[in-house]
Image (tube, grey):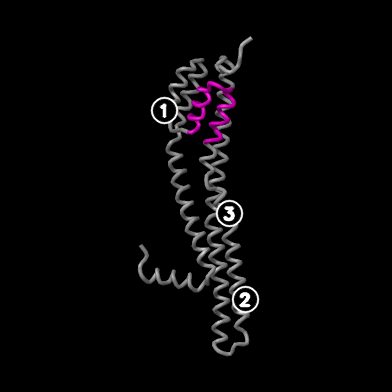
Amino acid sequence: MLNLPVANAVIEFIHDGGPIMYPILVVGVFAICVLVERIFWWLRFSARRNPRQLDEVYATLESGDLAKAIALSEKTTDPVVRMIHHGLKHQHSSMQGALEVAAGHELQAAGRFLGAMDTVVTLGPLLGLLGTVTGIMGSFSSIGDSELAVEKVTGGIGEALIATAAGLGIAITTLVPMNFFHGRLAKLQFDLEAAANNVLILAAQHGLDRSVKKP
């Protein structure tokens, strides 16, 4: 927990930034919540990957044993193996279609909140810019007022700088992990596509796609 001097400094910083600091604060808290959720999600994702099980499923399909491949992939936490299981169990659609649907679900879960993070990266600096404009407007409105004119002008400039720094800080803090998550999503998409192609090739070699009618 923050000690009292630090807490007072944070409150004073927000107060000196002017009214625009409150929406910036809301955006910052939202960004932190999203980052924490995504970090833990990807940590769990890494722990769920099981390359050995994936190789076992490939080996079983290569031997032409569809039932065993379905059984091996049934109870899995690996998203790639889970996609393969969905494709192998297709009943009313093609294997390729079932694999594409399953891959889409996995990518949707992995890409969750990336759009929100992109919005934060854009919205943070815009709110900071709005704080800059309102701060400078406050400074200009104080010019000519002899009573505490200097303090009001410097206060307005300080408000503008604090809002700008806060907005940019939120954007920079969100941008780096967002790009990292985009990279992980692209890697997952490649793994899913490669696995789906391998399954389709093995299924074609052994005639395991039950949606294909034999002449």
Q: Secondary structure at mark 1?
A: loop
Is 83 magenta? The answer is yes
The dominant secondary structure in magenta is: helix
Please tell me how crowded label 2 is: few (under 14), some (14-19), or many (20+) other residues with Cα within 10 Å.
Answer: some
Residue at image position (43%, 33%) is 77
Q: Nearer the viewer, residue 145 or 31?
A: 145
SS under mark 2: helix
Whole-number angstrom distance, CA of label 2 to CA of label 3: 27 Å
- Residue at the extreme bottom: 146
Residue 163 in percent (x, y) is at 55, 68
Residue kind at label 1, given as amino acid type: Lys
Give 92 or 215, whichever is nearer the viewer: 92
Disc ID at residue 119: 3
Mark 3 / mark 1, whichever is N-terminal: 1
Residue 16: x %, y % from top left: 50, 74
SS for callout 3: helix
Q: Residue 188 occupies which quadrant of the picture? A: top right
Looking at the picture, which amino acid does disc 2 mark? Met
Mark 1 lies on residue: 75
The part of the chain drawn in magenta is 79-105
Tell me the kind of residue under disc 3: Thr
Q: State the residue position of label 2.
A: 137
Q: How many numbered circles does the render carry?
A: 3
Gap between marks 3 and 1 measured at Cα? 37 Å
